[in-house]
Image (tube, rainbow, N blue to C red):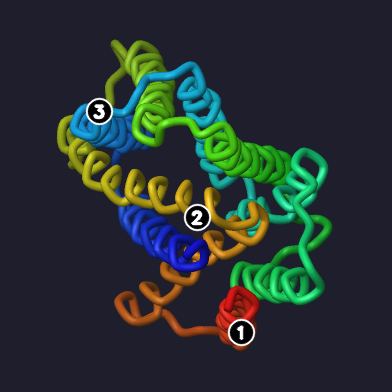
């Protein structure tokens, strides 16, 4: 079941990535968008917590840590895209599973057998092939620092999610604290931007703050569903393997660009897709 939950999480986060890609082409405030995304997550989580009557234990406060990691990772990723090479930042943000495997071994003595390790390597190589860009050189590494920071923060979020399953933290209260923390962080950043721009003449925006926030809430539905699936996957599977499979959400975005936006696949991307699917099949055989 961990593989099924991981694939479902990858699909959910892939849909989120498609919506992020679409909104990135629009003239809107990214902090307002993400504030709406996290707000919807908090709203859905608290409603589910009340309906299921889950307990609000001390362990649910791990969600605050998850929220901080998620906020920092997203902020670092977007900063990297703004100041550096998008392809390089994309590669780095696709590698949290490498960190997760190592840290999970140190913290919880999670070991991969030979076939699991081989499948893990195949998937990671596939992700690298998909995200790789031929225009990256040693002289063109702007944004690498932000990309590395985002990598470790995304890994921290995955490890924190696994931690919640180890201590049996109630799911929905934990997610509420995560999304509420992210909402506060992006909301404060939003207010900071408004105060900074107050009094300045700005061109009329086609996207009002209200409209941007509502679109963020729509994206938040895919985000909270993905988090529910990934925590269930961490509960039943090995941390590094789950993280690697969920990282394949980039393939969903790639398929969207191919069949909706009509972008052509390079040979490198085709090879990455093939390797990723081979890795998934290997995971399935190992799990059987």
Please give the label number shown on residue 154: none
Can see residue 83?
no
Residue occupying image coordinates x 43% and y 21%: 185
Residue occupying image coordinates x 59% and y 38%: 166
* Mark 2, other Cα within 10 Å: few <14 / some 14–19 / many ≥20: many
The quadrant of the image that shows the C terminus is: bottom right
**Closer to the camera: disc 3 or disc 1?**
3
With respect to residue 68, does 219 lie above or below? Answer: below
Judging depth in this view, the residue of 1 and 213 nearest the camera is 1
Q: Which residue is mark 3?
A: 53
Q: Position of residue 214 (x, y in %)?
A: 18, 38
Can see residue 135?
yes
Q: Secondary structure at mark 1?
A: helix
Residue occupying image coordinates x 29% and y 11%: 199
Q: Which residue is mark 2?
A: 233
Q: Secondary structure at mark 3?
A: loop
Please give the label number shown on residue 278: 1
């Amino acid at each position: 079941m961990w593989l099924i939950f991981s694939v479902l999480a990858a699909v959910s986060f892939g849909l989120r990535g498609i919506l992020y890609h679409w909104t990135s082409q629009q003239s809107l405030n990214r902090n307002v968008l993400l504030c709406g995304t996290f707000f919807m997550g908090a709203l859905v989580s608290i409603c589910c917590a009340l309906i299921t009557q889950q307990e609000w234990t001390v362990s649910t406060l791990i969600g605050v840590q998850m929220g901080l990691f998620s906020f920092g990772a997203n902020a670092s990723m977007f900063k990297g895209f703004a100041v550096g090479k998008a392809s390089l930042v994309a590669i780095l943000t696709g590698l949290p599973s490498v960190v997760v495997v190592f840290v999970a071994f140190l913290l919880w003595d999670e070991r991969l057998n030979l076939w699991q390790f081989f499948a893990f390597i195949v998937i990671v190589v596939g992700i690298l092939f998909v995200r790789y860009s031929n225009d990256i050189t040693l002289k063109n590494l702007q944004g690498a620092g932000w990309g590395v920071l985002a990598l470790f923060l995304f890994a921290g979020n995955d490890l924190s999610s696994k931690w919640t399953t180890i201590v049996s933290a109630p799911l929905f209260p934990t997610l509420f604290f995560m999304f509420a923390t992210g909402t506060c962080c992006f909301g404060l950043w939003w207010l900071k931007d408004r105060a900074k721009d107050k009094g300045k003449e700005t061109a009329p925006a086609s996207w009002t703050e209200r409209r941007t926030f509502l679109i963020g809430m729509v994206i938040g539905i895919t985000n909270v569903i993905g988090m529910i699936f990934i925590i269930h996957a961490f509960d039943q599977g090995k941390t590094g393997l789950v993280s690697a499979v969920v990282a394949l959400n980039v393939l969903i975005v790639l398929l969207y660009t191919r069949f909706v936006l009509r972008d052509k696949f390079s040979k490198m991307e085709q090879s990455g897709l093939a390797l990723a699917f081979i890795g998934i099949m290997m995971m399935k055989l190992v799990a059987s």
